[in-house]
Image (tube, helix red, strand yellow):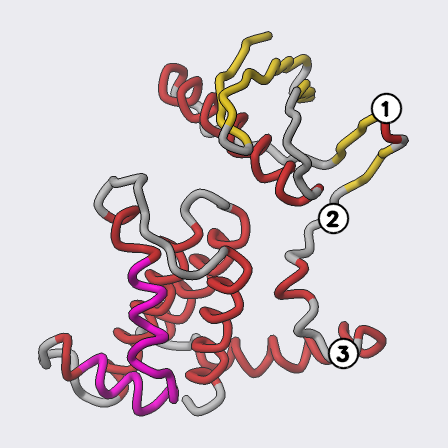
Amino acid sequence: MQFNVPFSHGGVHRHARVNIILNQIVVWLESDHNSDILGLRNVVESIVRSRLAMIGYLTGRAYDCEISRVSYRARDLDYMFGISIPCLADRVKSPESQAEQVLDDLNRIVSKTVGANGLYLQRCFKDLLSAMKDVDDTGFYCYRAIESLRHHCAAIHGLTAADKPHQWEKFREVSGAKKETLLAIKTAADPLRHGDMGASITLDRAELLKTTWDVVDGYLDVV
């Protein structure tokens, strides 16, 4: 399968050529814009996922894709992508003891997900994973992850019948998150939640992810 996809990059409208052969995807991208490698991957991934979503709709198949490599012979560039999100992976204090630390933290978190209220935390972690993987909808998933924590907080403090302002007030008290911090994440999410692509985002993606992780960390440390 081969098709051309129009896209905007650096304020210029261009086309990408996409080939899909035996489930392997190759994308030829032409642009005068000097983008960083991760930014380039995000552009290509958005292009491909958009078309795969349409094909999935037509065929009833849940396609997915992973952009694993960028090659640019003219600049002697050949780079293999990993699965790390740099702004989040850099939060690990000691890479040498990372495996041991992750195991300890995992056991601590798993113990919090037991029971009916634990389902809110499980949904939170799933949305955080989606936020890392889905560049276009990062804000949507970040805020919904925090909303799950708000529901969890309300449940364990007997506030499920309370109105949202009181639930958010309790969540801020417990997590230590500031109202303006949560509002900034909400601002990035609201247009996307209502199907509007013209999001007015005050945080870039890296800052959005780090801010969300800080809120989640603050809450998990005390519940």
Question: Which of disc 1 and disc 3 is earlier in sequence?
Answer: 1
Disc 3 target residue: 100
Instruction: Give the farthest residue toward the right.
Output: 76
The residue lying toward the viewer, choosing from 25 and 138, is 138
Name the spot of residue 176 as percent of width and height, x first: 38, 89
Q: Are marks 3 and 1 in contact (CB under 8 Å)?
A: no
Instruction: Give the SS element for disc 1.
Output: helix
Of the image marks 2 and 3, the number of the one nearer the N terminus: 2
Residue type at mark 2?
Gly
- The residue to which callout 2 is attached is 82
Residue name at image x 68 percent, y 18 percent: 28
Q: Secondary structure at mark 3?
A: helix
Above or below 153: residue 52: above
C-alpha span from label 3 to label 1: 42 Å
From the image, state whether disc 2 or disc 1 is nearer to you: 1
**Residue type at numbered disc 1:** Ala
* Range of residues picked out in magenta: 167-187
Left or right? Give the position of 194 relative to 100: left
Determine the residue located farthest toward the top in the rendered image. Answer: 2
Q: Residue at x 42, y 26 (%)?
A: 53
Q: Where residue 13 sits in the image (x, y, percent)? A: 49, 21
Q: Nearer the viewer, mark 2 or mark 3?
A: 2
Tell me which label, 2 or 1, sits earlier in the chain.
1
List x then y, in percent, for residue 133.
54, 48
Mark 2: secondary structure: loop
| Residue position marked by numbered label 1 in the rendering | 74
Calculate the distance from the C-alpha at mark 2 to the C-alpha at mark 1.
Answer: 23 Å
Q: Splitting the image into 4 quarters, where does residue 171 fall?
A: bottom left
Image-based side of 180 in relation to 68, left or right: left
Quick one: label 2, few (<14), some, or many (20+) residues within 10 Å? few
